[in-house]
Amino acid sequence: MIWTSSLPPFIPFFIAALLMLITRGHLRNVILLATPVLGGLHLWLDVQPFVPMVASDALITAKELSYQKSIFNYQLEFMRVDKLSLLFGYLFHIASFISIIYALHVRDTTQQVASLFYAGSALGAVFAGDLITLFIFWEGLALSSVFLIWARRTEQAIKTGTRYLVFQVMSGVLLLAGALIHYHQTGSTDFNFIGIESTAGWLILIAFGIKAAFPFLHSWLTEGYPEGTPTGTVFLSAFTTKVAVYALARGYPGTDLLVYVGAAMTCFPIFYAVIENDLRRVLAYSMINQVGFMVCGIGIGTALALNGAVAHAFNDVIFKGLLFMSMGAVLYRVGNINGSDLGGLYKSMPKTAMLCIVGAASISAFPLFSGFVSKSMVMAAMLQEGHNYLWLMLLFASAGVFHHAGIKIPYFAFFHHDSGIRVKEAPTNMLVAMSISAVLCVFIGTQPQYLYALLPWKVEYWPYDMTHVLAQLQILFFSALAFVWLNKQGLYPPELRSVNIDVEWTYRKLIPATARASYNLSQRFNCAVIDVVQQSWQGFQSAFRASRLSQYHLASSWPTGSMVLWIGVILGGYLLMDIYF
């Protein structure tokens, strides 16, 4: 029987991806929809974690449910189950189901195969029990996801996808190097707490940091996601960064460095998102901002903080997916996603506009929406541990995300100046997918106890008390007031038809300019050296011809043929002498 408790969840997705190559029409759609549904039911009904976790527990492997293979003397563990991996397993099945519904109108085999392999690789990564198995699926994520960018089939998408792949493969190489060093030092590749006390720990942390879009390692996200297809970007938003969050929660809980890295991640994207014109790129910056909250929670390392981090990852996949779906619907209908060219679309796409507002309210952490019940956990944990200044940074980031995602996205797409664009409402399958996400945003926001029951560590927190609600409403009120005032005064950055670059300036501008300057300098240096050598040789020849030495018989120039002849005669003479004497 295939649906056994030890069946790794990635297998149905990989099988379904292969079936996409030989099926068409309604049968293909049935396979697409059935894969996450049956896989999710199997995970919910048949697979249970071995040991419930409490705050002081390490993440415990359920050996009874492990599915292991031995390759090249390495023990690969494909099915390690605990409450942490199980939570992300549920999440990825839900995200896959919603994304597949959203993309049902697509008839591109490349995208369908890539999306199933991508989702399967994400599931393989979160259930991997060792670093080598993690590496296999880590690279699977890279190789499958890039096709969701290349599938747009534009020159810009091809170039961007290539740069995206370079970053992802670099992350895999660092992970493999760290895993091998870790094995050499400890004799084990088990994927549990790693820490940063060794070279291997640092290499693996950087590998995770690339996929989590740490500062200065994030340009693959802000470049790649806006270039994906309208449906492909929805898949991209769900898996790569959340696998990295899972990996950090597994390998680096309580690492103080991550608190500061996460705080920086929450703040710096705000400045770029506010001036960005491409609304999907605004959401890409917003994703870094939200992942920053998760990284902070992991760095704090308490039960409340870790629960807040993984709960926010769960919610972010849903509400960020909803926002990407609404902008994908606009791109699908209008063919453009620049804020400067949109506006007034609520008249022709009212359902999409309303669903977008639900996503905006969720990401802004409005009470009664999903973002509030998870982000507040990280904020509360930050205060409990005495990180007051960093808490202020998160407070600023909370206000900023309301500006650039909660207000800017729906405002410039649907309610700004009337652009005169009149299109059809989003296709039915897109509306259904967005509606499911919107319902989940409201349900989790109003009934958080059901999400809290799935969290890996014991939950002793309730978000709806007077302090949390009033504090959040004040932040939102004054943020909205600031947005209105800045717009009325003409101080809010306008939507310009331009491309903004941040850290990718280093390889778009600095590195090419440095390479050209270095090449030109080396050419000039080479020419100067050759000129000096030639002039010196010519001077030497002139001086020699003017001297008495040039009058000697041996100093004269002789034909090359004569010289070769005499060398042959001399060598022949030596050979005869060696034979007879």
Image: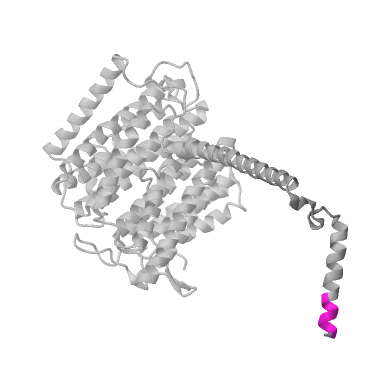
Residue drawn at (40%, 62%), measured in percent from left and top?
Answer: 178
Relative image position of residue 318 (x, y in whole percent): 36, 42
Quadrant of res 150: top right
Question: Looking at the magenta stretch, what is its main secondary structure?
Answer: helix
Residue at 35% across, 22% down: 493
The span shown in magenta is 574-580
Asked whether, in this view, residue 559 is left or right of residue 166, the answer is right
Q: Quadrant of residue 367?
A: top left
State the count of labels: 0
Q: Check residue 126 for magenta coloring.
A: no
**Of residues 543 and 83, the one drawn nearer to the viewer in this rendering:** 543
Q: Position of residue 408 (x, y in %)?
A: 35, 26
Residue placed farthest to the top in the image? 489
Query: Which of these two is toward me, 560 or 83?
Result: 560
Residue 90's place in the image compared with 152, above or below, is: below
Where does residue 81 sit, x and y in percent of width and height? 34, 64
260 in relation to 520, above or below: below
Q: What x and y, as percent, mark residue 260?
A: 26, 46
309 on left or right of 117: left
Nearer the observer, 528 or 297: 528
Left of 118 or right of it: where is 244? Answer: left
Quadrant location, the C terminus: bottom right
Answer above or below: position of 545 versus 82: above
Q: Is residue 579 magenta?
A: yes
Residue at the outermost bottom position:
581
Q: Is residue 189 visible?
A: no
